[in-house]
Amino acid sequence: MNWLDYVVLIGSILGIAGYGIWQTRFRTNLHDYLKGTGHTPWFAIGISVMATQASAITFLSTPGQGYLGGLSFVQVYFGVPIALIIIAMFFLPMFQKLDVYTAYEFLEKRFDGKTRSLGAALFLLQRGLGAGLTIYAPAIVMTTVFGWPLNATIISAGLLVIIYTVIGGSDAVTVTQKYQMAIIFAGMATATWLLISKLPANLEFADTLKLAGGFHKLNAVNFSSSLNQRYTLWSGLFGGTFLMLSYFGTDQSQVQRYISGSSLRESRLGLLFNAVLKIPMQFFILLIGVLIFVFYQFQPPPMFFDATSRHYMESHKTDAKLSAFESEFNSAQTEVRAQLENWLDSRHKGDQSSANSAFVAAALAEQRGENIRAAAAKELAVKIPDAKANDADYVFITFILQELPHGVIGLLVAAFFAAALSSKAAELNALGTSTTIDFYRRLIKRDASDADCLTATKWFTAIWGAIAITVALYARLAENLIQAVNILGSIFYGVMLGLFLVAFFIRRVEGNAIFWGALVAQILVFILYFTLSISYLWYPLIGCAACVLFSLVLQSITGKKQESLKGYAS
Amino acid sequence: MKNNTGDGDQEAKSDDGALASAGTGAAGLLTGSDLCPETKTETGLPYLTTWNTAYIFVACTFCLWLALLIALTELSA
């Protein structure tokens, strides 16, 4: 990065944060601070919901997922439209009608105080841990690539988001998210345009599709019914629906975004905006990864995208074994390029037979390259056991740094930071709100005035920010970053969703039954997570089903007991 | 602001025997019809004038994307 990149990066990030603070500096009323001034239109709600979900790792890691695994990751989002329709129909009208600050207030109105506390505690636990990861994830990638100090990056980004979220509350989050999303979309669109312009001139659109398809990068839908396969149509449709229903319907960081709409209509349209656009958005982000894959079939790719592995390779050129791997890998890639050039020529001349044989040869050479890469990765794992990072996290940033001009690099790094700040701000805002409304005002200071609660919310927001920074400072990489966040969510979300589904749809279940049923279900999910090896997308469904089932069983037992006690008393 | 949610419904007018007999409605908890969805209001959108048509539109968009993605997968096979 040069001075131009830093000007773009610092100017846009600080500019947006400063604007957010300026616009929302006079929020002295608790309602306005927690839910905004009530003038937020549907478009802003929609952008805010989208920005909250799309963190930096969405934009950093997802193209890498596309590069390595093709479009199959898009199946995770198949549940979004279904989930958002259900929320718009059932959840949202109830939240608006009750004029709640948090989703968990509804649980108290439906069941009792302890069920509300359980729901809020599950949210604080999983979101508090996740908040650390969402700030750590982009920081570790950026610092590994650019050589910035990790701790300083985490602390400075964390402090910036704490400052504007504490000062402006909910409106500051919404106002900044609009401009942060503008930076993100501008960055991604520019990168896509430049990427397409860098593909070989004789590679037509149909050729690109054929090539990507031939290497199984367009395999968007997997019909397999195996529970062990992570991304399938069924895990996306069923597991994904439960995951998204849990996230959008019960996670305060999302609920707080859409209940801040100026009316039920605005909030609903904001949700439906996401229901329509989420799958195309994820598709295009994955497609960027697929196009980078196509690009690197005609340009020499690095053997490893992961920065730690690459730095090690560069600094250990005398290692005979690794050098041999690299040389064999480069030779395989040279053959891929040569064969694909033959394939293009034959294809354009209409010589289908030669084209087919050239493509098969290219595919075999590519597979040979992949085998060499895998063998080299094993060798590297022995030499640098701490380097657990997945290549997926580094594909896009490597392409950006190697291929894009200065200024655009700054814009894209700004986009990653904007995404990190936008989701982080919503999380902190929600954590502060839930701590104040669900615990402080109910259990710690029952006679707290609105002014007390406003001050407490600001303090709790700052404290959660500090906790997130601390978690980020001590975090260690777990497989792939975006998956780590999703896995963490999937462990808790099922039971949270179970609480809400029972609340809405199973009216005979009462407070004690749902409370104990949810606790037992959460313990079951923990046990299953550590003993089974099924896709994480199934855990929300399992947790939710267990919560519903256990609460029904407990209700039938306690209901009978109560009846017999009544009979005895009479 | 909440013209379409029927605020008056919030008082306990339960059609749910279990909750009503448990006395929860009287305790101020949400019961029966309080938990029913409402779809009466209009969206204010051209063509998609009711919420049900808006939901159907979203579902159709999803089906179209699913069809496109399946077609891409077939291309890849």
Image (cartoon, helix red, strand yellow):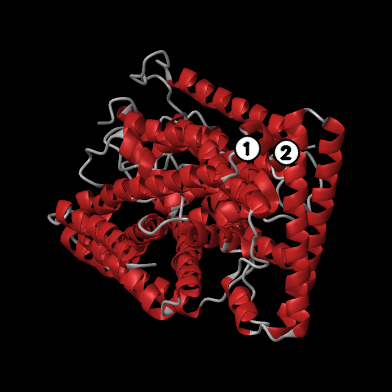
Where, by quadrant of the figure, is residue A432 drawn?
bottom left
Q: Which label was assigned to residue A202?
A: 1
Q: Position of residue A141 (x, y in %)?
A: 50, 68
Residue A290 appears at what percent x and percent y?
63, 47
Quadrant (top left, top right, bottom left, bottom right) of the N terminus of chain A: bottom left
Decide: marks 1, 2 in contact (CB < 8 A)?
A: yes
Element class at badge 1: loop
**Residue B5 appears anywhere in the view:** yes
Residue at mark 2: chain: A
Residue A232: x and y in percent read 73, 44
The mark that comes first in sequence, 1 or 2, is 1
Amino acid found under the numbered disc labelled 1: Asn
Chain for disc number 1: A
Residue drawn at x 80%, y 37% as measured from the top left: B77
**Is A102 displayed left or right of A262 in the figure?**
right
Q: Residues within 10 Å of mark 2 (few under 14, many from 20)?
A: many
Q: Please, is residue A260 above or below residue B44 in the view?
A: below
Residue at 65% across / 38% down in the picture? A208
| Residue linked to disc 2 | A344
Would residue A238 appear left or right of B77 to someone viewing this image? Answer: left
Tell me if residue A111 comes above or below residue A21 in the rendering: above
